[in-house]
Image (cartoon, rainbow, N blue to C red):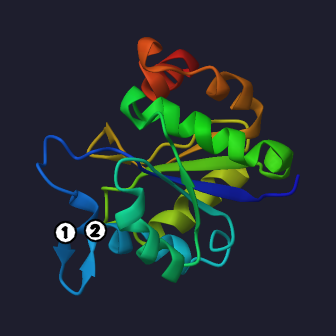
Amino acid sequence: MTFKIASIILAAGASRRFGENKFLIKLGEQNLIERTLEAFVNHQELENDIIVVTGHYTKELDPILKKLRVKQIHNPSFNDGMSSSIQRALQFLKKHLHQYSGLLIHPGDIPFITYHDLDRLLSCHKVQPYKIIIPKFNSKRGHPIIIPQIMYPELDEIGEETSGLRGLIRASD
């Protein structure tokens, strides 16, 4: 089996609870979205297949994402929840989806993912290419996660009414 992963970074939300565009807040010299994407764009196995799904702040994020050489797609239905952004990414990848052994899905507002974290996830995917890969810390599940190719049909059916990605993961346990 060939192992190739597409990364889907979810950055479509309106940051309502935060009160402003959280993706542009500064973390040292970088803003949140740059810091979140840093390990992905510097990872040899992931750098060419990074899709960032934007929504409410598409115009504000556009110049940053162009500098980082990631593929940006706009989700006009961002108010429908995270599932709509995942579905938008699947539509974007549709013609080439069969090339990917898995899809790595990560919220754009979780910035402290390292190159090493990504390496460990990819290694687990290579050992168990038909299972969902979810990192854990202190017995608590986290991000990013890898959805295997065998589960793309189920991923395409998720929606907020079925608890989205969380519902898919629960159903596969």
CA distance for labels 1 and 2: 6 Å
Q: 162 left or right of 131?
A: left
CB contact under 8 Å: marks 1 and 2: yes
x and y, in percent, of residue 13 in the image: 33, 44
x and y, in percent, of residue 86 in the image: 55, 38
Looking at the picture, does residue 113 appear above or below residue 82?
A: below
Q: Name the residue under label 2.
A: 32
Name the residue rendered at 18%, 41% in the picture. 16
Is residue 8 visible to the viewer in this orientation of the structure?
yes
x and y, in percent, of residue 145 in the image: 51, 45
Name the residue rendered at 67%, 40% in the picture. 90
Q: Which residue lies furthest to the right in this view?
A: 1
Q: 92 left or right of 173?
A: right
x and y, in percent, of residue 40 in the image: 52, 70
Q: Mark 1 points at which residue?
A: 25
In the picture, the disc for residue 74 is: none
Q: 112 left or right of 3?
A: left
Residue type, label 2: Leu
Name the residue rendered at 31%, 57% in the picture. 110
Mark 1 or mark 2: which comes first in sequence? 1
Looking at the picture, does residue 53 appear above or below residue 43?
A: above
All told, the count of numbered labels is 2
